[in-house]
Amino acid sequence: MGTGKWRTLLAVCVLALCAACAETSAQPADPAAPHVACAVPTKDPAIRENPVTRDPAVIQFVATLQERGISVKSKNPSGLVFLLVPGHVYKLSGGETFIHPYPTEARAIEEVPRAVAGVEDPRIQYIDTPHFYRCDSLIVGSHGKNKPVLRDLMSLCGPQFAGY
């Protein structure tokens, strides 16, 4: 089999895997199976642009983190499927932080039990130790053990409501 045929076969396999992953990540067929997200990277900034990054509460939160000397880099849309509103992932010094803005503080407070259930769901596997906070109208989830970052999140948001 020639090189061109192998490349075509590989491309078809990758597309089939991503299509299958997209179907299963929306609704896992087996409730006992771990949730796995599938993402296809893109170089088109218009596709990667997430309206969450333009939310005034998110902009203010990110600016406050940066003022405290924390490196913050925008990554991609959040894949936390157990939260009701879209979010965005930011790379912070020593870990990743997921920011989900709610229209009001009251809606964010209503979301806390759902977030707790999601964090405690054994089917969801985390890259590193999860920590979840409510900061006014934001639900903020952070992965990692960077003590200065966790200390700043606690200072801004109060004690974590979920995680370990």
Image (spheres, rainbow, N blue to C red):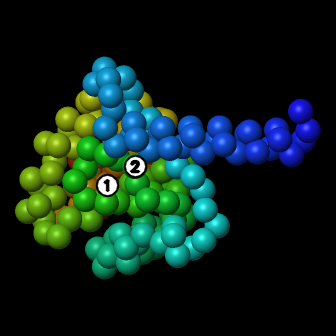
**Residue 25 seen from this side:** yes
The relative height of residue 162 versus residue 109 in the rendered view (above or below) is above
Q: Quadrant of the C terminus?
A: top left
Q: Position of residue 127 (x, y in %)?
A: 49, 36
Q: Position of residue 9 (x, y in %)?
A: 74, 39
The relative height of residue 13 versus residue 102 in the rendered view (above or below) is above
Q: Which residue is mark 2?
A: 79
Q: Secondary structure at mark 2?
A: loop
Residue in the image at 28% along x and 25% along y:
31
Q: Which residue is mark 1?
A: 140
Q: Nearer the viewer, residue 98 or 163?
A: 98
87 horizontally vs 104: left or right:
right
Residue found at the very far right of the displayed protein: 2
Quadrant position of residue 103: bottom left
- Residues packed near mark 1 inside 10 Å, few (<14), some (14 to 19) or many (20 plus): many
**Residue 151 seen from this side:** no
Q: Nearer the viewer, residue 86 or 23?
A: 23
Q: Nearer the viewer, residue 53 or 26?
A: 26
Quadrant position of residue 163: top left
**Which is more N-terminal, label 2 or label 1?**
2
Residue in the image at 13% along x and 69% along y:
104
41 horizontally vs 118: left or right:
right
Quadrant position of residue 116: top left
Amino acid found under the numbered disc labelled 1: Val
Q: Nearer the viewer, residue 63 or 5?
A: 5
76 horizontally vs 102: left or right:
right
